Structures are given as C-alpha cells and as structure tokens.
Amino acid sequence: MITLGIESSCDDTSVALVEDGIRVVSSLVSSQVEIHQRFGGVVPEVASRKHLEAMLPLLQQAMGQAGVGISEIGQIAVTAGPGLLGPLLVGLSTAKALAWRYGLPLVPVNHLEAHLTASFLACHKHPRFPYVGLIVSGGHANLVLAEGPRRYTTLGRTADDAPGELYDKVARLLNLGYPGGPVIQKTGLTGDPKRYSLPRPMAGKGYGFSFSGLKTAVLHLVAQEGSRLSVPDLCASLQAAVADTLVGKAAAALKETGAGRLVMAGGVAANKPLREAMAALCERVRVEFLVPPPALCTDNAAMIAAQGYFTAATVDIDPLLVNGRADWPMGAPFPL
Ligand code: KG4
Ligand code: ZN
C-alpha cells in the first residue's frame, strides 16, 4: 500500500510516497533555508506563505516522478505537530482536502515520533520495540523509551535550548551562517576537540538536558580569547561537549531500561562526531544502534508516511477534526 506523506512543520515543505511503510518510492523536500538565512532563524509567517506556494507543485512533482496516480494512493499521513502553527496548517489543510475529495483514510502524525521511525525506514525494517529513542533537532532534545506504536515514555527533555538551536545561535555569534549545525561540523573538521574545555551540562543529573549554559560558556570564551580564538578548535570542542552530554544520558537510559536498541534521529543526528560517539557507546555496551542517513535525519515527509503507515490503526478520532498543535507530546492523544 502506498502512503502519501506531507510535512510542513517548520521551514521544509516535503511530500513523499512510501510503500508498505518501508520503501521510499519518491521523496521531495523544498527547503526555505535561503529565505530564512538572512534573519538567522525561521520567520513563521514567511514560512507559512512559502509552504503554500511550494505544496501543490511539489505534490504534482512527487507523483509525476514516481508515475503514481491518486487512485494508487491508499492513505494520507500528515504532520499535525509539534511545530509552527501556521506552517502546520498548510500541510494539514492540503491533506484534509485530498482525503475528503478522494475518500482516503487520513493519519495525523506526530513529527517527533516520525523522526524516530525514519531510522527503521532507512534500513527497510518495521519498527522493533522496545528501544531507547533520542531525538535531537532544532527544537527538541527528547530521550524516550518506546514500547509500541505511539507508546512512549518520556525520560528526559531539554529545560531550555535544543542542541540544534545551540548550534544555530553559536554559528550566528561566530558569523558562520545558518543553519549552524552543518557549518559548525565543517569548520570543526580541522579543529582540536580537546582545545577548549566546555561544560557537560547536567552530566550525571538524571535524564534532563540543558544547552543554554553551554551557549553562555561559548559567549564567555569568545570574549575572553578575543583575536586568539581558534574557530575550528571551538567548533570541534563544542561538538565534543554536546556528544559527551548526549552519550552520557543515552548510556544511563540503556542501562536502566535494559532496552537492546538505541535509535537516534532529528536534524542534529546528522552530526558526524555525535554519530561516531553514539556508535562507539552502542558497540561498548553491545546494543543495536539505528540512525538514519543525514538526508532522513532532517525534516522529510518519507518519515511521516512511514510513521502514518505503522500508526494508522491507532487513529481513534475523526481525522478531519484534528488540528495543528505547536506542542504535542509524543504518544499523547490526537490534537482536536
Ligand atoms: O530536525 P530538523 O531538520 O528540524 C527540526 O525539527 O528542528 O533539525 C534542524 C536542526 C538545525 O538546528 C540544524 O542546525 C541541525 O538540525 N543540524 C545539524 C546538522 N545538520 C542539521 N546539527 C549538527 N550537525 C549537523 N550535521
Ligand atoms: Zn524535525
């Protein structure tokens, strides 16, 4: 069965066709990064308008490229949250209109849950439970125990900034551009990760995260070092601090839950030093490690289609009544 996935929760418009939840037939992403670049972050109202412009041409392109007609689509999956309300409404309205017009089942999808499912999609597997899930993106740092479709227990989340937000803010401070994560990774390639000693926020203090203190520490370091500052060393040291922090929390969660699998996802999961550190942890404690390739780490509709496929049976409301929700916790009831 082919699921049409639609994603518009932030600054990427994306449409995908996924067969049986595990095979990507077509996946297109229209990025708005160049528009938001000049503001150093996403401007919600601008994002909504751009989604509106991009959505229908992208849909036609995805179906045209795959040679798939509407009659071959079995259901529609759409992001209902969490995300920016205006952008979410563009995707939701499109999906509802199509579902109503063509009489197709509609599955509202939680964006964070879908990020984790991307790891299974990447290796053409059905999700396997239980697992410890770590979502690290521009808006989130969530550590969860996943025990079934839409069954998550949140172990910890960030009290302030998300790691992607930290990278975006530090990149802005260093005049490196936007988004920060990829450029910090690139700049740090030639840097020494041990050169600057940065804090490991909340290490050993439960599962919660906090990244705003790390941003303050970077600010102080930049002011203190002045013209002596090595930007590559700072980028490498910052990525090491983030990776150490996340690895520490993931290790504790794996130990306490006894789960045999760690799934990492979200835009920041594209980060190479973090992937390497997490892979090393999993090898050390002998658990399976799943992380999508970078293109499936950042926002995409293929993960929405996959999550929709595996959670269709949990839809217990009229999906045409579902509303966009800026904050929709993983596993919580569908937002009306
Ligand atoms: O998941 P995502 O595409 O959007 C959200 O739902 O937030 O994540 C975007 C975030 C941005 O903050 C970006 O700087 C970060 O992911 N990011 C990275 C890398 N690629 C994207 N951070 C670190 N290293 C990367 N290679
Ligand atoms: Zn995301």
Image (cartoon, helix red, strand yellow):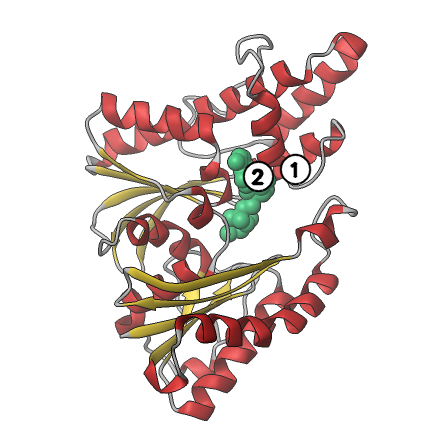
* Label 1 near ligand 1 (CB < 8 Å): yes
Q: Residue at x 64, y 68 (%)?
A: 51
Left or right side of 255 for 137: right
* Tag 1 and tag 2, C-beta contact below 8 Å: yes
Badge 2 density bin: few <14, some 14–19, many ≥20, Cα 10 Å: many
Image location of residue 48, percent across then percent down = 68, 67
* Label 2 near ligand 1 (CB < 8 Å): yes
Q: Residue at x 43, y 50 (%)?
A: 296
Amino acid carrying label 1: it is: Asp
The answer to whether residue 280 is visible is: yes
Image location of residue 260, percent across then percent down = 19, 37
* Residue 20 figure quarter: bottom left
| Residue at the disc numbered 1 | 168
Q: Which of the two residues, 176 or 198, is positioned nearer the viewer here? A: 176
SS category of the residue bearing label 2: helix
On residue 67, which mark appears? none
* Residue 216 figure quarter: top right
| Residue at the disc numbered 2 | 164
* Residue 72 figure quarter: bottom left
Badge 1 density bin: few <14, some 14–19, many ≥20, Cα 10 Å: many
Image location of residue 8, percent across then percent down = 56, 64
| In the depicted structure, whether residue 48 falls above or below residue 163 | below
Amino acid carrying label 2: it is: Gly
| In the depicted structure, whether residue 314 falls above or below residue 120 | below
The answer to whether residue 201 is visible is: no
| In the depicted structure, whether residue 72 falls above or below residue 212 | below
SS category of the residue bearing label 1: helix
